Amino acid sequence: MNCLEARRALLGEPRRRTSEVEAHLVDCAACGAVAAGMLELDDRIAEAASVPAPDALADRILLARERPPRLRYAAAAALLVTAALGVMLGRELVDTDATVEVVGPGHPAVAAMSEVAEDTTRVLLSEEDAARELEHVLGRVGLALRKGEATAHYVGKCQVTGTACDRIVLSTPDAQANVILVPEYPLGPPVLVSDGRRSALASPARAGGYIVVSDTPKNARRMARLLRKG
Amino acid sequence: MFESRAKRFEALVRAYSAELYRYGYWLCRDRFTAEDLVQETFARAWNAWSKLREEKAIRNWLYTILRNEHARLYERKRLDVVDDFDLDSIEDRKLTSVSPEFEMREALHALPEAYREPLLLQVLGGFTCEEIATIMNTTPGAIMTRLSRARLALRRSAGRVDKESSA
């Protein structure tokens, strides 16, 4: 084996050296340096490529298998995505393909629509406690309610994408929305999705994010504007 | 019997979900979609459990399912590799004084998918050329070529970052 052949082999599989490559490296210091450099390069590639997996990913997968109806709804919702995303609020792109590339059946916006449709939220609080809790849960994600523009009611705890969330209901004289507060799941740029029956606008907040679920895309955006940075 | 199957499945999920997520992330480069891909991979694996003959082939099987699921999700046509692709163009990006790890990640993003995918299957997944060729439905020789070209491009890119950092 000559140097060219050895280096080709090292570039392809630096960690699996044939006996011929090993024999060449014994006699060739230059190729030995190339071999060491390749191992170092692979370490750097591995370090850069090792993106962290989400917390409790395995738990969510196992939970999803035990709850098939929810998954089916989520998958159907993703397939029926009709309205678009806007990196800037107010901009709407009617481009289903572009939207499908951004969201999938596990996206929190789709999961939030499932949650509202299935209404599995646990209601544990009295009216008085719920009023106190409302301010607390909004503040935890860095939000507050614009005063005098809507009534809000804390509903209770729920699960979206395997994460513990809080659910509140916002009402104005002509519209209503469920707001899912996701304190421990950082959301990306705003995404608006719709399955024809409900629309969900997912937005980042100071800590985590929030998803406004309403009957139309227009109402989801309108109701989202009732929240401000807290 | 069902309980045994469920336990084995759970062990599988706990053993491989994180590495499949990483592979999925680099295929689609979107963390929500990557999680969906892993979810769907295990859902399909569960449904096709009875077809699994060789326990030792299970990891390759999961990677193949995820790859197929990614292709199905995007209804993507199989990519043809353009062998004269100008990998040197990766070096033309403006380098800034950020960490070498960040620059390496950017260089990986800039690699064409046909080169990045086999490289990550080998570096992260530890697969051999033959195994990668099976997963990607091509020949070991083609994989070897792509791996060599990918490493050469990244080595040039990394070398420039090191020079800038030490300057």
Image (spheres, coloured by chain):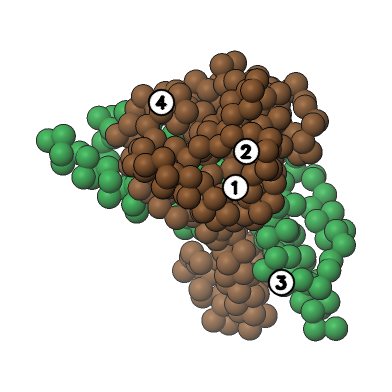
Residue A88 seen = yes
Residue of label 2: A202
Q: Check disc 3 and report its element: helix, strand or loop.
A: helix
Q: Chain of mark 2?
A: A
Q: Which chain is green?
A: B
Q: Which of labels 1 and 3 is toward the front?
A: 1
Q: Residue visible at 16% across and 41% down?
A: B4
Residue B100: assigned label? 3
Q: Which of labels 4 and 3 is toward the front?
A: 4
Q: Amino acid at mark 1?
A: Gly
- Dots 1, 2 in contact, CB < 8 A: yes
Q: Residue visible at 41% across and 47% down?
A: A129
Near mark 1 (Cα within 10 A), the count class, few <14, some 14-19 or many ≥20, is many
> Which residue is nearer to you in this view: A16 or A148?
A148
**Quadrant in the picture for residue B44:** top left
Q: Check disc 1 and report its element: helix, strand or loop.
A: strand
Q: Label 1 vs label 4: CA separation? A: 21 Å
Q: Check disc 4 and report its element: helix, strand or loop.
A: helix
